[in-house]
Each structure stands twice: as C-alpha cells, then as structure tokens.
Amino acid sequence: METKLVFQSNLKQKREEALKKRQAQVEQEKLEKQKQLSSQLLNLFDDSDQQQQQHQTNGNNKILELQDKLSDVNPEDFFKQGGLPNVHLGTGNNPQRKDDYKDNYKRDLRDYRDSRDSRDSRDSRDNRDNRDNRDYRDQRDHRDNKSQNYNSYSRRDTSHDERRDTRDIRDNRDSRDYRDQRDHRDFRDPRERRDYRNFNKQNEFRGNRDGDNEDKRIKEMETNENGKRNKEMMMEIQDIQNEYLGIKGEKKKKPKKSERNKFKFDWDTSEDTSTDYNTLYSNRGEIKPQFGRGTLAGFDEKSLSIGSQSQEIINENHWTKKSLLQMTERDWRIFKEDFNITTKGNNIPNPMRSWREGNLPKQIMDAIHRLGYEKPSPIQMQSIPISLGGRDIMGIAETGSGKTAAFVIPMLVYISKLPRLTKETEAEGPYALVMAPTRELVQQIDKETKALAQYYGIRSVVLVGGLPIEDQAYQLSKGCEIVIATPGRLNDCLEKQYLVLNQCNYVVLDEADMMINYGFEAQVESVLEAIPSSFMKSENEDLAQKQESDRNRIYRTTILFSATMPPFVEQLSRKYLRRACHIIVGEAGKAVDRIKQNVIFVKSENDKKEQLGMLLQNGPPPPIIIFVNKKIHCEIVASVVEESGLSSTILHSGKSQEQREHALDGFKRRRYNCLIATDVAARGIHVEGVTHVINFDMPMHISDYTHRIGRTGRAGMEGLASSLIMDKDVEIMFDLKNMLTQTNNIVPVELSKHPAAQQKHGSQTDKSQKRSETVIYK
C-alpha cells in the first residue's frame, strides 16, 4: 500500500529554506551543464582538419553519438533561445558513469519536482524556452512516473494545501498567448485561445471546470458596471465644465396644451405619402438583359418599346391636352401645383384654365379680348369661378398678380343680372361697393372697371379725398351701380347722408392690410355696419350653402383681398365673411421671384447720393420709380436725377389731387423718366413697363418694402429693385435678410454680419427675472 506524505504547518519555514538552497544549487548545476554542452556543440561544427584528425585519433564515441542525435536539428532553431536539444551527456563508453549520470539526473528531477509545492517556484518559468510547466504538472506526477487522476489531484490541491493558488484557472501570463519577439513567431493557440488544460494527451476534451463559466460571467458584469460608471462620471464632469464656462444646455420644450393630445404620425407632414395607382406611372418599362436572345445585343426590345409608348401616352394625357370633361381630380391637383394655387374650404369649384372655360357673358369676353388679356392669371383662374357661384373669398396673392380683374369681372356679371336702376331705385344706393386705401389705387380700379364694363353701360363713381365733396355728392345723386372709394371719404359721405347702402350686396375690400396700416380700422367697420345685415348669409354652413343656391333672394357677397394677413384682417374675415373660400397664390407677403433684388450698404447721406447717381446711369432704362420716406427728400432726389440727365416728377401727400393726377398721368405717358414718390404711391399704381425701382430711403416694415418693389415685375415681366441701406435702418434688417435668402438673392456681407440682422428688432435677448430669483430686502 502506497503512503503519501503530508507536511505539517510547523515545518513550513525549515522546508522553504531547504528548498531555496536546493533550488539555487540546481540552477547553478544547470548553468554549468549548459556551458559544457554549448562548448562541445560549437567544437562539433568546427570544419577544420586539425580537429577532425584529433577526434579520429581519440576515438571519441561521445561525439559520434551527438552527431547522430543532432543530424535532424535545424541550425536556425539551434541558435534560438530554447532551441537546444534535451541531450544528456555521458562519459565515453563507460557504462558505470552513464548509470551514475542517469541516477543523478532522476534525482535532480525528483528534487525539482518537490519544489512544486512552493508557490514561488511553481510560478517561475523556464527562461530558456518560456514554457509553462504548470500544465504538464497537472497531467503527470513525475515523482513516481505515473499518470494521476486529474480530479483526485485537483481535490488534493483544494482540500489539503492552503498555499496553492488558483492554478486550475487559466493564467493570462501564459506564454502561449504572446509572440516570440526574436522572430515574431506566434505561439498562441490558433483555435481561438484554446485552453489545453481542459484536454488530455490524446487531445480529448475533459469538460470545463466548474468555476470557469462563473468567473467569466462575473468579469462581464464587472466590465459592464465599470463602463456605466465611467459614462456617468464623464457626463457629470461635462455638466460641471459647462456650468463653470456658462454654457447652457438645450432645454426640453414643453408641448403646448393644444398639442399634448395631438396624434403624431411616423412620417413628416412634408413627405409625399400618396401612392400612384396609375399603371402608366407605376409600371414603367425597364431594360432586361436576355443574354443574346433578344434583337438588341442581349436587351429586351419589347420592354424598350413599351417604355417609349407609355411615355407618349403620359405626354398625350397631360392636363393641357385634356378637355374639361376628361379632367380628373388628380389632374386638377397637378394643375394647382403648377400655378402654385392653394385653396382651403368645402366644395370649392375647380379653376378655369382659360377664358373660354369661365362661361363669361359675351360683353365681358369682348372687353377682355379688347384689353388684350390672353390668359387669366392664377388668382383669376381660381377666384372668378368661386365668385360667380356667390361664395365669399379671402384671397392672398403677391403684388402685381391681377387681383383687380379677379373681383371686377364677377362683380360686373353679378350687376348685369340685376334690374336696371330707375329714379326710384337710385336713391337706395349702388349695387356694389369697392374700398381701397389710396386715391391712386381707387382711380386705377375705376379705370379698369370702366374698361371691362364698356359694353354694359354700368356707371361707377369715385369717392376720394382731395376733391370737393359736393362735386362727388352731385355724381352720386345722378345714380350709379358701383361706388369705388377710400374708407375716409366714404365714411364722410355716409355721415352727411350723401349716400346710403340699402341695396349694396357686393362688397370688395382691396389691399385690406394697407388700410389697416393707414389707420382705417374704424372707418372700415363703420362702412360695413352701414350695410343692412338682413342680406348676410347664415353662419351655419349647411344653411349658407342653401342660401347661395337660392335664386329667389339675393344675399351679400364679400370679397377681401390682401397681400399679407395681419390680425385685424383675420378678424374682419371671421366677422363679415360666411362660408369663405381661402385662396393663396404663392406665399403671403413674398416678393415675386421675377424681381431681382439688389441691396447696397452705404455709410453716409453723401455716399447714398453717389450710389443713386450710379444706379441711374448704369441701371436699366426708364421708366424708374424712386421711393423716399419724407417729402423733403423728394427735392434732394430730384436734383440728383436732374444731374444724371433724366427728367422727374414728384408725387406725395402734400400735392393737391389735380397735381397728383397730372404727375401720374405724365409719368404713364412717358413725359417724365422718373417718378419720385412716398409710400402713397407704393400700392395700386400700375404703370406698364417699369423696369427699375429704387429705395432711396428704406421703409421700416418688410410689408412696405414688398409693396414698393412690387411696382416692377408686373404682368409676367422681369424687374430690378435696388435698395440703399444704412446702419440706422435696423428695423428692417432681419426681415430683409430673410427675404433675400428665401428669394435666392445676394445678401451683402455688411447686412449678414450686422447685429440687427441676427434677431428681429425689438425682441428681448435676456429673459426677464423669475419671481423666485427676486431678492426682497426686509
């Protein structure tokens, strides 16, 4: 029966000292043996004749044995660390010395094997070949030269020896996981860091140890927790740094109460989610390779012909080549997109594509052809069919889009269906009323109304300030079907009872936003209240729809046109419009794209005069309109124009009505090259062929700027608008920069970098102090 020695703990110190001494002796002996072996091997490879003769004469059998053993050794491996063969030298042919050497060698191995129980010696590696003998110790017990059971050996380590480390767990210091630095050989396991401790000599897998998976799982949890902690620490450090530097983070916007319960789609509202079910568009022909079987070098000729035929069908079925009955809902949608028409309301009639589709009376068609109107403008295409049906309209269109004819033509059709005025009915007032903000715009509307009504014999009267009110009262006493007036003079006539509106059922407010800017809110409301409310349609949409189709009774039709939508205009539309159709052509308040805008930054008033002279000499030819803010500047600009060799006329509120009419008529007839005017001429003055508009003084509001430059680029023509801007014009810089950017015009560097152009004028940069931050001193 074999007995096993168990060392007691009181012998620990003595054993360690003895082992250390023995270990030092073993290491010394190894070094001496290595030196002897190296010298012998170097002498072996010496090719000199003298050494060969000496070896032959001595009959050294030991060298012959070494030659046989080293015949298969690679010289490259020989000179590398760990490349020496494990050869034990004897002493010639003496068998007794060979046996002694073997005994000594076994004793050395056994003694070295005993040092395994020391933790320091167990972890030390052989420096010659960097091999870790711990794996082999776990497989074979060299003291008795027998293979031991792995499980029993492991149990002995864990249960009886407290000094053993976790030798069974894979050590990262294993040299197999590193490369040999001398020749970059990779000793790592190519099977993804395979742990040989789980395999026996026959390369059979013995299973994972119980602690391996658990340790791996613990390490993964620790790395994840450390990553989260590091991320949180970095975020805290970044917050502290931002707070120290004064950088404020983005605050989450609280949703409005009206948007909290609002359903949000997965797609954005700007995306096109419509599906095209038309086979002509969805199934297009594609080139399919036939690998030599087709007639076009491997491509499908049939698919090519189908694709070309479908494109021809698409071109043939465009809305421009379809009749009115062939137009589908999709065709009308494409038509509106082509002309940038947007409508809002219920049961809106389709637009008319040409004058023939409008079903207009012969008298109106003859007048249209005589005036040379070939095609209707986008606002006319959509508003005329709606107005002919008796619907109220809220129209927003860009300046110079043809809004005047858009409401005059339906108004004339409406009046033509009513009975002729007699001496008894003339006292009840006109059938229709048109209000505009300026005298010039009123006269312009009256001129176009008379041109379109020349075959009807319909009379119109103009009521504007600057003319004797008695003369205008006399014209009203003779009777008229249409009254075109400014709000101020019209309100005066109503108060003095020169006019009544008892049978006025067609009301038009042109340039409503401009009337608000001029302060006519009270006058406009007073005039609308003077019209009998019994002709108003019901606020109920269903009942209002029935009233519109009722031919036995007449209800009021209200049309409101504006270039922008201020709050008061929106209030008017809600109060006086019933079941209104909203029409938007282009963008509200946007300058037409046909106008090229040129903004010049000047430093002083003298520089402004010089730039004006250069614009007059190098710019487009006359007619030219120059806008100023003050009447005093009109004379200054007139002198600059005269120095440039051009003639000019002046138009402002200080002129009498006769002088103003004379100046405007002379500019239209080309007796004057330039018209110098204040904002009174910004709206409604339609002069054909104006090529250049110059803003000598910049307005304060972007809406005034839009209406000024709208005097050019009308009726489909192109125009140029030049503006001279100074540092003091801070009120308009922000909006002007945005307009130039939106219309793809050049923004001057001085304007883009100016502080006033970075935010809207009057906006607060710093938030007011919170109540909680207020310090109250007792």
Image: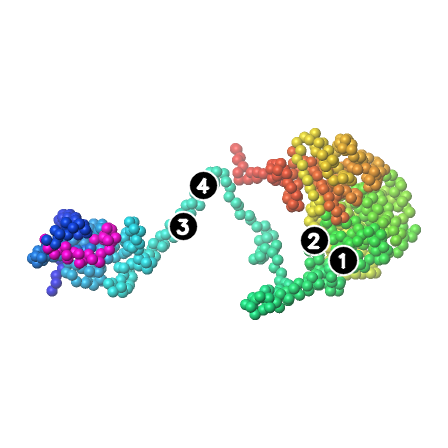
Kindly report the distance in space between the C-alpha atoms of the residues bearing marks 2 and 4: 52 Å
Instruction: Identify which amino acid the numbered label 3 is placed on.
Output: Lys
The first of marks 4 and 3 along the sequence is 3
State the SS at label 1.
loop
Q: Which residue is more in the foreground, 437 or 277?
A: 277
Q: Are marks 1 and 2 in contact (CB under 8 Å)?
A: no
Kindly report the distance in space between the C-alpha atoms of the residues bearing marks 4 and 3: 18 Å
Please identify the quadrant where the N terminus is shown: bottom left
The first of marks 2 and 4 along the sequence is 4
The first of marks 1 and 3 along the sequence is 3
Kindly report the distance in space between the C-alpha atoms of the residues bearing marks 1 and 2: 14 Å
Q: Is residue 445 left or right of residue 398?
A: right
Circle 2 residue: 340
Circle 1 residue: 352
Circle 3 residue: 228
Label 1 packing within 10 angstroms: few (<14), some (14-19), many (20+): some
Q: List x then y, in percent, for residue 642.
A: 78, 32
Q: List x then y, in percent, for residue 253.
A: 55, 48
Instruction: Identify which amino acid the numbered label 4 is placed on.
Output: Ile
Identity of the residue drawn at 87% across and 39% down:
468
Label 2 packing within 10 angstroms: few (<14), some (14-19), many (20+): some
Circle 4 residue: 240
Instruction: Tell me which segment is drawn in magenta.
Output: 58-84
Q: List x then y, in percent, for residue 205.
A: 28, 64
Q: Which residue is more in the foreground, 132 or 197?
A: 132
